[in-house]
Amino acid sequence: MHDGMPVVVTVTGVIDETPTIRTIRFDHPFTIRPGQFCMVWVPGVDEVPMGFSSPDTITVQRVGEATAALTSFAVGDKLGIRGPFGNGFSPEGRVLAIAGGVGVAPLLPLAEAGVVETFILGARTAAELTFATPLAACADLRIATDDGTAGYHGFVTGIIDEEIDLSSYDTICVCGPEMMMKGILDRLIAAGIAGRGQFSLHRYMKCGVGVCGSCSIDPAGLRVCKDGPVFTGDQILDSEFGVYSRDASGRRKRP
C-alpha cells in the first residue's frame, strides 16, 4: 500500500467508452488487487476516490466538478495518483459479478483475471454499456438495460429473479448504484446467504487512509477507505447502507 504523496503520472491515452464515460490511461502501472481504489488528485480542482479499471487506468463518469475536469484531460496532461488503497474483492469458488453503470470499472480486472463465471452488466441504455466486449470474452455475460435497447428490459435484479440461482454461487461481487446493490443484498438475505455477497461501497472521502472519518458508516463506524471499500453482506446488515450517505459537510442524503 502507498500512503504517501501522490505519484504524478502523465496521460498516455483517452478512450471514449460511452457518451458519458471515459477511460484515462497513464504512464505508471500500479500493483493492484481488483476492487482497490486510488485517490485521484486533479490539480487546482479536488482529490476524489476512484476504482482502478486496470493497473494503469481509471474509468470516469462525469458527475461533479472533479470528474468533469478529468473527462476533459488529454494525452500529455498530468494528474496525481495516491494508492492503491482498500481491501479489494476476495473471490472464492463459483463467482457471480454484478455491475451497474460505471460500477463495472473495478470489476473488470476481476473478470479479466478469469475468476468470474457469470457477469451481469446493467446500464440505462445500450449506448451506456461499458466494457461489454472484453467482459463477453472472459465470462458468461448477461446484459440488462433500463430502456430495453439491449439484453433484458429492466434492472439487473430482474435478471437475477428470472435467470439466476444465487445460492449456486460461492461469491457474489457487486458494484454500482447503492439502491441497485441494496436490492441484491435483500435477495441474498432472503436466500440466507448474505455473507456470500461482497459489495464495493462509495462514500465521500477526504484522506483515503482512515484518518478523517468522513467515510464512516453508521452505526459501527466502519471506514469505507480503510475497512473497505468492499464489505460482505453480513458486515453491512442493519447499517446506513441503502438508507443514507453523507455529503462533504456531513449532512445525510439519499444514496
Image (cartoon, rainbow, N blue to C red):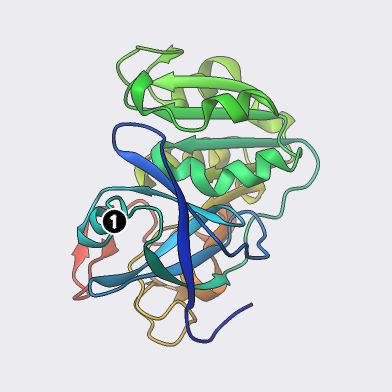
Residue 151: percent from the left, percent from the top?
A: 46, 13
Disc 1 packing (10 Å; few <14; some 14–19; many ≥20): many
Kindly identify the residue that appears in the image at 69 percent across and 39 percent down.
Answer: 112
Does residue 126 lie above or below 217 as drawn?
A: above
Residue placed under numbered mark 1 in the picture: 67
Q: Residue 78 location in percent, x, y?
A: 39, 67
The residue lying at 44 percent from left, 87 percent from top is 211
Q: Position of residue 27 (x, y in %)?
A: 55, 61
Q: Is residue 197 above or below residue 150?
A: below
**Residue at screen point 46% across, 27% down:** 156
- Residue lying farthest to the front in this orientation: 76
Q: Position of residue 161 (x, y in %)?
A: 51, 21
Image quadrant assignment for residue 183: top left
**Amino acid on which the number 1 mark rests in the picture:** Thr
> Does the image show residue 173?
no
Instruction: Please indicate whether residue 124 sits to the left or right of residue 202 in the image.
Output: left
Toward the right, the furthest residue is 93
Please tell me whether residue 39 is drawn above or below residue 90 in the rendered image.
below
Q: Residue at x 50, y 45 (%)?
A: 105
Front residue of 17 and 210: 17
Left or right side of 120 for 253: left
